Amino acid sequence: MSAWLRLTGVVAGYDGPVVGPVSLTLARGEVLGIAGPNGVGKSTLIGAILGEARLYAGEIWRAPGLRLAHLPQRLVRPRELPLTGREWLACLQASTQALPRALARIETQRLDRLSGGEYQLLHLWGVLSGPAGLVLLDEPTNHLDPVHVHLAAEAIAARRTEGAVMVVSHERDFLHQVCDRIYDLAPGAGG
């Protein structure tokens, strides 16, 4: 398998280094989990890959033309826009084919009328079924009940054939369920 993403000695942060050094490779068809305690820099690592966090040392290489999609830890709903779930998926260039029943039931509802879990699952489906080659998921099980967590795991597993996924989660059982391997970030790194 050829690499789609390679981090070599990455140290990243915002006002100062928070995470690193981190070296890892992610290939097409892989699901990589990122684990570690609060404050260790899991979300900052995703920010560095997206180009939002400052890179203090090391190198981040992405395959030429690789498209990224990101599910942030804290989703912001566009409350001002009366979009339906189907319209939101279209904005994300996501497929509405083979929607799970839980999403098919809500795709015609307005976003501002969905529960937190319904919105989380809709957005998760959107980034996973969109055109990106690499999907970065930051705490994808936030607000999800056990049934929706199961649907999330199925959607992540289905993504393997289309690209690669990096999953940040505090839920180690979930990471073991969906990931091929887990990279543990150690506390106190980055300085």
Image (tube, grey):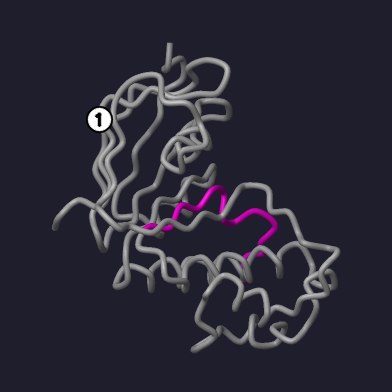
Identify the residue at horizontal 63%, vertical 71% (top origin): 122
* Residue 22 shown left or right of residue 116 in the figure: left
Percent x, y of residue 159: 38, 70
Q: Quadrant of the N terminus?
A: bottom left
Most foreground residue, 159 or 17: 17
Percent x, y of residue 120: 66, 63
Quarter of the rendering containing residue 29: bottom left
Identify the residue at horizontal 65%, vertical 81% (top origin): 102
What stretch of residues is rendered in magenta?
Answer: 134-147
Identify the residue at horizontal 29%, vertical 72% (top origin): 161
Residue extending furthest left?
1
Q: Is residue 90 magenta?
A: no
Q: Is residue 138 magenta?
A: yes
Q: Above or below — where is 80 with respect to 171?
A: below
Q: Residues within 10 Å of mark 1 (few under 14, many from 20)?
A: some
Q: Quadrant of the C terminus?
A: top left
* Residue 187 shown left or right of residue 80 in the figure: left
Percent x, y of residue 181: 30, 48
Say which residue label 1 marks.
8
* Residue 154 shown left or right of residue 74 in the figure: left
Q: Above or below — where is 168 with respect to 7?
A: below
Residue extending furthest front?
65
Count of numbered tags: 1
Secondary structure, mark 1, is strand
Query: Residue flagged by tag 1: what amino acid is it?
Result: Thr
Identify the residue at horizontal 33%, vertical 22% (top origin): 21
Percent x, y of residue 54: 47, 26
Q: Above or below — where is 106 with respect to 141?
A: below
